[in-house]
Image (spheres, rainbow, N blue to C red):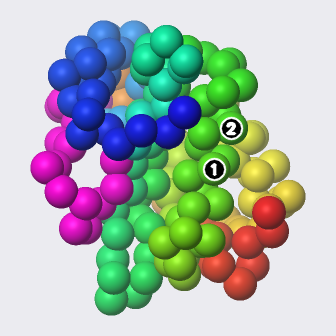
Amino acid sequence: MIKPAQLYKEEIKKKYIETWYNEEYMYYSGWSGVEEPDIPDNNYDSHHFVSVDNDGNILGYISYSVSFVTMSADRFGAISFDKGNVLFAKDLYQIICDIFEKYHLNRLCWSCIADNPAIRGYRNFIKEHGGRECAYHKQICKLMDGKLHDDVEFEILAEEFRK
């Protein structure tokens, strides 16, 4: 189930902090240090959601900023606290559909560290649902492994989105 993240602020922060020193999550933040997620008390220029199971346990956190000038969902990010959970994947897909169908935004964009194993899924997603890789940045961020990593930017336009 998708719920507003504002209802789960403290639980999200705790789960997020638990990922800070886990190399498995180093690709999420995109830099060598992280901070608690900033979940505002409004939805003016960003949307924040949690995916929860039937018992109210948080499966993951999804957020993006909203530009009403360009009608864009920018800096889209998702982190799963229960790797491989199908319910989280369904909720994530529903939020992407809502960006175009419910909120009528024109563009969705996100970036991914090129070495992130999830990039394969992102490339498959844009191949199946529309979109493109729109930029590749060499050696743009240093992660907890001490290495400089490349970054790939993705985008999907509403007119190209295939459900």
Q: Residue furthest bottom?
A: 69
Q: Amino acid at mark 1?
A: Gln
Q: For label 1, count other residues whose C-alpha is less than 10 Å away and answer few (under 14), some (14-19) or many (20+).
A: some
Horizontally, residue 142 falls left or right of residue 124, namely left
Q: Position of residue 156 (x, y in %)?
A: 64, 70
Count the labels in the image. 2
* Cβ atoms at labels 1 and 2 below 8 Å apart: yes
Q: Identify which residue is drawn at 81% across, 49% down.
A: 124
Residue 8 drawn at (x, y percent): 27, 28
Q: Please determine whether, in this image, residue 22 is positioned above or below residue 30.
A: above
Residue name at image x 60 percent, y 57 percent:
96
Is 29 on the left-hand or right-hand side of 119? Answer: left
Q: Say left or right for 106 vs 44.
A: right
Relative height, residue 149 to residue 22 (above, below):
below
**Residue ID at (44%, 68%):** 73
Residue 94: mark in rendering: 1
The residue that disc 2 covers is 90
Q: Quadrant of the N terminus?
A: top right
Q: In the rendering, at what x and y percent does residue 4 appear? A: 35, 42
101 or 159: nearer the eye?
A: 101
Q: Residue 49: in sight, yes or no?
A: yes
Question: On the image, which quarter does residue 89 sit in?
Answer: top right
Asked which secondary structure carries label 1, the reply is helix
Q: Position of residue 76 (x, y in %)?
A: 45, 54
Looking at the rendered structure, the secondary structure element under dot 2 is: helix
Question: Residue 21 sits in which quadrant?
Answer: top left
The image quarter containing residue 74 is bottom left
- Amino acid type at image mark 2: Lys
Magenta segment range?
A: 32-48
Residue 17 visible in the snapshot: no
Extreme residue toward the right, this view: 128
